[in-house]
Image: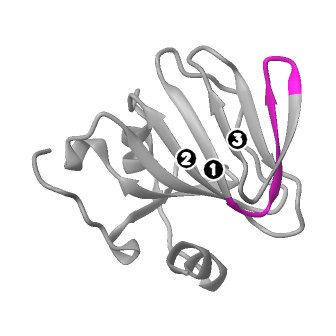
Amino acid sequence: MDQPLLRRAADCRVARISPADTNKFVMTVDPLADRTPFVSVVEIFDIGGKTPLHGHRQAHEMFYVLSGHGRAHCAGKTYDIAQGDTLVLPPGMDHVVENTGSEKLYCLTVMVPNEGFAEMIRDGEAMALDKADDAVITG
């Protein structure tokens, strides 16, 4: 990448990794297309939705809560998260992030390095944003 990147929300890929997942991703920075060392998404968790238990061998992962309430389970501890909170996980730490609120949970999620995350999103099921998603993503 040798030029600034500007991507409008309407131009972002929206996908769910697998049909059974309870969250979808709006890919704001795609390391494959944009030639960046990281991936950035807005992760949208359905009510009651959560990630599967997982970890990343080499990547740091950051969640910044844009809207909603949730809980993160990491390294045997539980953290309540809400709008304005930042959670950073080091490589190798298994974790689950779940929506515990009565509305969707929206997180800006950044992973450095990509470690295959963008590829999973690209290979996933294409989705659309509903009115609530669009309001949070575009303001």
Residue bearing mark 1: 64
**Helix, strand or loop: magenta stretch:** strand
Residue drawn at x 61%, y 85% is: 131
Residue 51, percent across and down? 70, 41
**10 Å crowding of disc 2: few (<14), some (14-19), many (20+):** many
Which quadrant, please, contains the N terminus? top left
The disc placed on residue 51 is: 3
The Cα–Cα distance between marks 3 and 1, rounded to whole angstroms, is: 15 Å
Which quadrant, please, contains the C terminus? bottom right
**10 Å crowding of disc 1: few (<14), some (14-19), many (20+):** many
Q: Is residue 56 magenta?
A: no
**Is residue 52 left or right of 100 when viewed as pictured?**
left
- Residue type of the residue flagged with mark 3: Thr
Residue 58, percent across and down? 46, 16
- Residue type of the residue flagged with mark 2: Thr
Residue drawn at x 75%, y 46% is: 50
Give whichever of 138, 134 is nearer the camera.
138
Residue bearing mark 2: 109
Residue 40, percent across and down? 44, 48
Count of labels shown? 3
Q: Quadrant of residue 66?
A: bottom right
- Residue type of the residue flagged with mark 1: Tyr
Residue 127, percent across and down? 50, 67
Q: Quadrant of residue 32?
A: top left
Which SS class for mark 3?
loop
Q: Quadrant of residue 67?
A: bottom right
Which SS class for mark 2?
strand
Q: Which residues are magenta?
A: 66-77
First-in-chain label (3 vs 1): 3
